[in-house]
Amino acid sequence: MTRDCKPRAGAPVDDADHAAKTGGNTAEAPSSSSPDVGAPFWRVKALSQMSLAEWESLCDGCGLCCLVKLEDEDTGQVYTTDVACTLMDGDSCRCKDYEHRFERVSDCLKIDLAAVANLTWLPATCAYRLVGEGRDLYWWHHLVSGSTETVHEAGVSIRHRTISEDDIDEADLPERITEWGGEG
């Protein structure tokens, strides 16, 4: 079993008018020309150059990282279930104890630079993956839209679509494997 915890989504950082500037764009690759002084941080900085506040604000709040995953021991294939970590609040799509998650959940995996580079199962819509690949954020990302609700409205999040691991027997996990699509 693999468990992953992600940084929680925060308010937009240092660019309150970014939604107006981006015009609701989709995941287009950022320009490789000289940095635009007025451009949002995710378009001009590599993940390794971001401040903690910038890094944390990249999280779109979808909750996909906080789902229980199963790995096939023979093939290495990772399957995602609809079973959420004990600390995931399925209504708010937030960790119930973000600050102490590593102490409370022994196999919680921190999403950091190494994780972004090595976790092939990160969703194609994940902001860390997108920025790491030199791509832009989707229109529904709160740093683009200005609202933390658009990830849920776009149907990309796990909100109201999971069961807590506290409410299921571990032997039943294979029956809970789910394809998590999402609109980009």
Image (cartoon, helix red, strand yellow):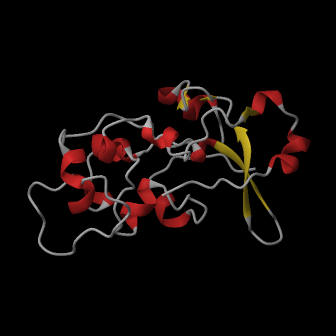
Which residue is at 73% across, 43% downward? 82
Report the side of 24 relative to 5 (left or right): left
Where is residue 1? Give x, y as percent.
75, 50
Which of 143 and 3 lies nearest the eye of the viewer? 143
- Identify the residue shown where x is 71% and y is 55%: 179
Question: Is residue 46 depicted above or below 11 in this figure?
Answer: below
In the rendered image, is residue 92 in sight? yes
* On screen, residue 148 above or below 58: above
The single residue placed furthest to the right in the displayed view is: 171
x, y percentage for residue 121?
Answer: 61, 62
In the image, residue 154 above or below residue 130: above
**Residue drawn at point x = 29 percent, y = 45 percent:** 54
Residue nearest the viewer, comparing 36 with 66:
36
Instruction: Please give left or right for residue 96 compared with residue 68 in the image.
Output: left
Residue 31 % position (x, y): 22, 71
Measured as percent of width and height from the top left, residue 101 is found at: 55, 31
Q: Does the rendering let one see residue 113?
A: no
1 to the left or right of 102: right
Between 82 and 73, the one nearer to me in the picture: 82
Q: Residue furthest left?
A: 37
Residue with the most extreme bottom position: 33
Q: Residue at horizontal 52%, vertical 46%?
A: 110
Q: How many marks?
A: 0
